[in-house]
Amino acid sequence: VGSLARAVQKRSSGAPPDTGPYWFHVDQPAPMFGLEEYKEVGEVTPGSWYLALGTYGDWIHAADEQSVIEGWIAASAARPAPYDNRTDPVRWQRPGVVAVHSET
């Protein structure tokens, strides 16, 4: 909980994320915790893409493709998608967030 509390505090203070945005998936189901509290609000599951809005330490501020669920997941659960492995990297956008990887 300590590292999650630090991630929440960093995001709440307006500090920029360490990395992001980027698309990712998970190999196994993982819990998603609320943005401002530490209770489970959902789950990320294999077979879906998720948008990492930002990584703060050991935690990812993430959202599902439809923006229905948003919260924190452990960064260790995420598998970032290589750019060429996505069929449409900008399937979904939020105001102020462009989820595009550059090909470098």
Image: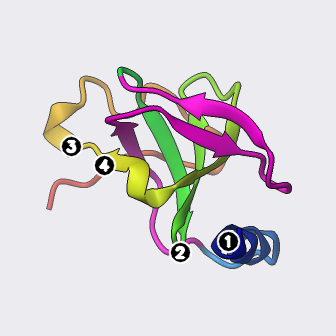
> Where is the N terminus found, in terms of image quarters?
bottom right
Q: Amino acid at mark 1?
A: Ala
Mark in the foreground, 3 or 4 = 4
Q: Residues within 10 Å of mark 2 (few under 14, many from 20)?
A: some
**Real-space Cα distance between discs 2 and 3?**
23 Å
Q: Which residue is mark 2?
A: 57
Which circle marks residue 80 in the picture?
Answer: 4
Nearer the observer, 48 or 92: 48
Q: Amino acid at mark 3?
A: Tyr
| Mark 3 or 1, nearer chain start | 1
Q: Residue placed at 47% from the left, 54% from the top?
A: 21
Which circle marks residue 83 in the picture?
Answer: 3
**Real-space Cα distance between discs 3 and 1?**
26 Å
**Is there a contact, CB below 8 Å, between mark 2 and mark 1?**
yes
The percent position of residue 68, horizontal first and vertical second, equals: 70, 25
Q: Does any portion of residue 95 appear in the rendered image? A: no
**Label 1 element class:** helix
* Magenta residue span: 17-46
Which circle marks residue 90 in the picture?
Answer: none
How are the colours assigned in the image? rainbow
Q: Amino acid at mark 4?
A: Pro
The percent position of residue 89, horizontal first and vertical second, equals: 34, 34
